[in-house]
């Protein structure tokens, strides 16, 4: 009697296991680990929402290779240790095929290392550390968003040909700040040897009143100030720039100064005349593809898409196309298919570069300006810098990876 | 030697330094207002209130809401400056009557942990009420722009802060030295049992002091709101600076808080002038120097 019970239980277990794995085989699962609480969530929800919008359309057409795409999210609360544990849980328990996220560079590098060991494809959808697809890049990690090295080079491409010669670098005293500041100056000097660095100023992360830091810079009279701040630091600086009329004294460049979450937070009070770059603007380019994307996004979420929406959308397109190209669900074939893959997007065709697994997004450069149509500043005099012009060269990447 | 002195005097008269001192002083104002509230509570109630920074944050968020209610602009700003600190005072009143008043007999460590837990609770409450998004209080047009001082731009709002600082200091001095409540609270700080024994309602005195201290935190938050972006986590750096200032000035001494804030603000702004790359180091170095020379703080501690 007892033996019978055990056998029945075993059979039930096997049956359950078979059922669950056969269920798993009918879908492709993507696991997002990201910061969904706290200030960083201003950016991360757009990634998932853009992703969701893309896969809904794909699933409605029957999915890819006859399988539907599913996704699940985990909130790592901006903590790398939590993020890594969640990535492990997603792979072991949820059996996800692909990992994606995160906005925290520390988490991204930890998850990337785990993905390398487990041979799971991992899409970095926001973190800006240049190490992700640079020094610590590997076969299983893909960079969607721009990184600090790319920001620096894009800045130099846009600024070096203008007449500025005396530069000053100022920013927040943490890894992102220094990485952006250093990269901006390094590439500017490379492209314009006559450029001069008059000095640098660094304030601590979260510093409320920046006036004491800025007055000495005005006195030094640089003609271009590179500001290397992130998140809420951008807004604190932009508020002060307006209060002190800094734009009258010097040119000011701040990456993401024209980004939607920044200008929206400042409203009509934002400072006009700050130069900035960003990977996506919902009102530019005015192509049918972008218009359709924006319209669909607005319809689904009742708000215009921010840069994260493009990252999430592009990640979904890449995943689908790579599976189609690979022809079967196989991780190694998926990676091979991903290398050099070209997909359509609201901002035109995008290529996943083979040498470093970095997506070649265009970078938009513009100047903040008031507009009667909007409740916030928009970018004017927009210039599009194609990916090939501002991504570090493959030689450069190989060099840093060898170190 | 004489030569060097003259050089230093000449350097101090340069427009850069004068401007930097003014900017440093205006920064001092908010630090002083918040730290004096912290010090007041510390001196009379003996509570190291970690949640003080959270109340400052709540003050800033309330300023955001109030200024929006009154349609932004100048009225919105003045209403925010009045109503937000009062709102914070109300929150602190509820907390004090509800919880703290029952626990004054406990050890310091218990009260310390309790205020720490409140810092966490307030943080989450702010997230529930206002969300995680960036908020900004628009600078009223009256305060917008800058005035050139010796050729360097000086924000008009900083002038306003320079006026607010002495105003708050004088009011505090009047409350502490000229009112009965202030005198009782000074006595209660020295010996609370004795004050109780004379038949004074110590609990009520404590409540008033706690509420005034928290009002100051809220006022600091409302004053800072137009120059920064109101966001979760803005309390973290401030509470650390406020504690350093209070420790440097002497625990529980309001004038110590003023002195500490002055040292903190001025070493920071002048440090930036000397060595912009490492400007952040100077105020903390000043704290170390002060505490090495006077381990109990600059002025007499009430502890």
Image (cartoon, grey):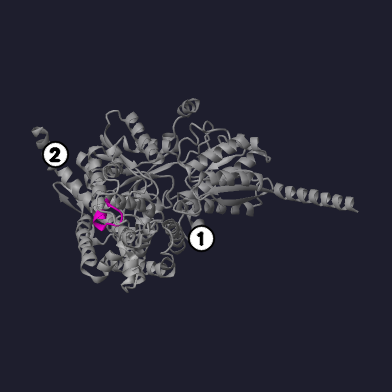
- Residue B67 in view of the camera: no
Q: Which residue is at the front of the view, B2 or A256?
A: B2
Q: Say if B81 sits above or below A316 in the image.
A: below
Q: Say if A47 sits above or below A389 in the image.
A: below
Chain bearing mark 1: A
Residue A12, percent from left and from top: 81, 52
Q: Which residue is mark 1?
A: A299
Q: Of helix, strand and loop, which one carries label 1?
A: helix
Q: Is residue B242 left or right of residue A92?
A: left
Q: Which residue is at the front of the view, A159 or B202?
A: B202
Name the quadrant containing residue A193: top left
How far apart marks 1 and 2 lie (CA) works out to 62 Å
Q: Is residue B255 magenta-colored? A: yes
User: How many numbered discs, if any?
Assistant: 2
Q: Is residue A309 magenta-colored? A: no
Q: Of helix, strand and loop, which one carries label 2?
A: helix
- Residue A110 in view of the camera: yes
Q: Which residue is at the front of the view, B69 or A371?
A: B69
Residue B85, percent from left and from top: 32, 66
Chain bearing mark 2: B
- Residue at 31 percent across and 43 percent down: it is B284
The C terminus of chain B lies in quadrant: bottom left
Name the quadrant containing residue B35: bottom left
- Residue at 64 percent across and 35 percent down: it is A332
- Stretch of the chain drawn in magenta: B249-257
Q: Which residue is mark 2?
A: B11
Q: Residues within 10 Å of mark 1 (few under 14, many from 20)?
A: few
């Amino acid at each position: 009697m007892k033996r019978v019970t055990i056998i029945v239980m075993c059979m039930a277990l096997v049956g359950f296991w078979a059922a669950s794995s056969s269920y798993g085989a009918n879908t492709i699962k993507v696991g997002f680990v990201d910061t969904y609480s706290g200030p960083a969530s201003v950016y991360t929800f757009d990634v998932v929402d853009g992703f969701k919008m893309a896969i809904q359309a794909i699933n409605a057409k029957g999915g890819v290779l006859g399988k539907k795409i599913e996704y699940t999210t985990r909130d790592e609360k901006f903590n790398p240790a939590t993020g890594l544990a969640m990535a492990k849980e997603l792979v072991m328990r949820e059996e996800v095929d692909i990992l994606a996220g995160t906005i925290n560079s520390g988490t991204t590098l930890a998850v990337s290392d785990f993905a390398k060991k487990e041979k799971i494809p991992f899409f970095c959808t926001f973190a800006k550390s240049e190490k992700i697809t640079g020094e610590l890049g590997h076969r299983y990690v893909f960079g969607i968003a721009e990184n600090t090295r790319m920001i620096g080079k894009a800045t130099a491409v846009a600024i070096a040909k203008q007449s500025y010669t005396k530069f000053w670098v100022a920013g927040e005293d943490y890894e992102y700040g220094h990485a952006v500041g250093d990269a901006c100056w390094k590439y500017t000097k490379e492209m314009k040897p006559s450029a001069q660095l008059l000095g640098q100023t660094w304030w601590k992360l979260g510093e409320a009143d920046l006036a004491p830091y800025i007055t000495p810079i005005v006195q030094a009279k640089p003609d271009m100030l590179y500001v290397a701040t992130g998140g809420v630091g951008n807004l604190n600086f932009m508020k002060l720039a307006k209060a002190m009329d800094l734009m009258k004294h010097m040119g000011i460049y701040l990456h993401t100064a024209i980004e939607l979450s920044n200008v929206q937070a400042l409203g009509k009070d934002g400072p006009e005349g700050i130069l900035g770059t960003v990977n996506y603007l919902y009102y530019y380019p005015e192509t049918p593809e972008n218009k359709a994307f924006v319209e669909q996004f607005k319809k689904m979420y009742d708000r215009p898409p921010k840069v994260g929406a493009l990252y999430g959308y592009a990640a979904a397109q890449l995943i689908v196309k790579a599976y189609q190209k690979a022809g079967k669900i196989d991780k190694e074939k998926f990676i091979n298919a991903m290398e050099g893959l070209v997909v359509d997007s609201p901002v035109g065709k995008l290529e996943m570069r083979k040498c470093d697994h970095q997506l070649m997004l265009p970078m938009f450069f513009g100047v903040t300006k008031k507009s009667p149509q909007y409740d916030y500043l928009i970018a004017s005099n927009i210039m599009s810098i194609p990916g090939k012009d501002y991504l570090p060269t493959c030689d450069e990447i190989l060099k840093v990876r060898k170190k | 030697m004489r030569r060097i002195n003259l050089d230093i005097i000449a350097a101090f008269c340069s427009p850069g330094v004068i401007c930097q001192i003014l900017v440093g002083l205006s920064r001092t104002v908010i630090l002083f207002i918040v730290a004096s509230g912290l010090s007041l509570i510390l001196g009379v109630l003996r509570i190291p209130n970690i949640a003080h920074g959270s109340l400052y944050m709540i003050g800033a968020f309330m300023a955001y809401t109030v200024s929006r209610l009154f349609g932004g602009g100048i009225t919105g700003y003045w209403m925010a400056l009045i109503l937000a600190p009062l709102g914070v005072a109300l929150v602190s009143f509820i907390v004090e009557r509800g919880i703290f008043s029952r626990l004054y007999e406990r050890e310091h460590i218990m009260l310390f942990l309790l205020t720490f837990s409140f810092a966490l609770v307030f943080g989450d409450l702010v997230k529930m009420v206002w969300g995680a998004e960036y908020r900004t209080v628009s600078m009223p047009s009256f305060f917008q722009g800058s005035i050139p001082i010796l050729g360097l731009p000086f924000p008009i709002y900083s002038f306003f802060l320079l006026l607010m600082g002495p105003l708050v200091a004088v009011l505090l001095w009047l409350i502490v030295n000229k009112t009965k409540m202030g005198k009782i609270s000074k006595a209660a700080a020295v010996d609370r049992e004795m004050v109780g024994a004379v038949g004074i309602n110590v609990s009520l005195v404590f409540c008033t002091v706690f509420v005034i201290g928290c009002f100051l935190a809220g006022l600091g938050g409302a004053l800072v709101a137009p120059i920064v972006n109101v966001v979760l986590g803005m309390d973290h750096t401030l509470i650390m600076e406020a504690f350093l200032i209070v420790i440097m000035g002497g625990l529980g001494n309001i004038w110590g808080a003023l002195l500490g804030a002055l040292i903190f603000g001025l070493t920071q702004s002048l440090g930036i002038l000397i060595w912009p790359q490492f400007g952040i180091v100077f105020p903390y170095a000043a704290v170390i120097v002060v505490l090495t020379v006077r381990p109990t703080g600059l002025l007499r501690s009430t502890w």
